[in-house]
């Protein structure tokens, strides 16, 4: 599992994913973690990273599907992407 970075404003979590020999930054909105992975709204950074670790398989699957549809250097999964899985 890649290392997660939490933004200064706590609104996103990002990580780097290897994709076809290139690195892609995946930026996940905190709201996705709250809605789809039960992250409490008042969770601290340690809890946020823990939830990310538990949810990584699904997050990675969504990110890779988006990359298959449209290759890019930065991918931003949205709530709609997770509601389809």
Image: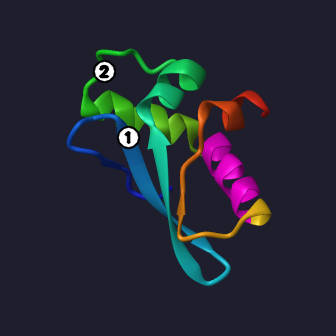
Label 1, on which residue?
A: 12
Task: Work out whether 15 lies above or below 52.
Answer: below
Would residue 82 be found to the left or right of residue 18 on screen?
right
Task: Work out whether 10 lies above or below 22.
Answer: above
Would residue 44 be found to the left or right of residue 18 on screen?
left
Query: At numbered mark 2, what does the secondary structure look like: helix, strand or loop?
Result: loop
Q: Going 28% across and 33% down the picture, which residue do you hit?
A: 46
> Disc 2 or 1, which lies upstream in sequence?
1
Q: Residues within 10 Å of mark 1 (few under 14, many from 20)?
A: some
Which of the colour schemes (rainbow, by chain, secondary structure, one colour) is used?
rainbow
In this view of the protein, which residue sits in the foreground, 1 or 59?
59
Residue 43 location, x and y as percent?
Answer: 31, 21
Query: At numbered mark 1, what does the secondary structure look like: helix, strand or loop?
Result: strand
User: Magenta residues, as a range?
Assistant: 57-67
Would residue 47 be found to the left or right of residue 51 on screen?
left
Residue 85 location, x and y as percent?
Answer: 78, 34
| Magenta highlight: main SS | helix
Q: Residues within 10 Å of mark 2 (few under 14, many from 20)?
A: few
Task: Work out whether 19 lies above or below 57.
Answer: below
The answer to which quarter of the image holds residue 22 is: bottom right
Residue 12 location, x and y as percent?
Answer: 38, 40
Q: Residue furthest bottom?
A: 21
Would residue 24 be found to the left or right of residue 70 on screen?
left
Image mark for residue 43? 2
Image mark for residue 54? none
Q: Going 70% across and 63% down the picture, which residue do you hit?
A: 67
In this view of the protein, which residue sits in the foreground, 42 or 70?
70
Q: Going 23% across and 37% down the picture, which residue do you hit?
A: 9
Task: Work out whether 77 lies above or below 70.
Answer: above
Looking at the rendered image, the disc whose residue lies closer to the viewer, 2 or 1, is 1
């Amino acid at each position: 599992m890649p290392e997660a970075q939490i933004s200064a404003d706590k609104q996103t979590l990002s990580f780097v994913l290897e994709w076809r020999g290139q690195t892609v930054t995946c930026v996940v909105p905190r709201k996705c973690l709250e809605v789809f992975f039960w992250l409490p709204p008042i969770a601290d950074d340690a809890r946020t990273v823990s939830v990310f670790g538990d949810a990584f398989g699904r997050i990675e699957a969504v990110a890779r599907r988006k990359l298959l549809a449209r290759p890019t250097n930065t991918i931003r999964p949205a709530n709609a992407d997770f509601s389809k899985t």
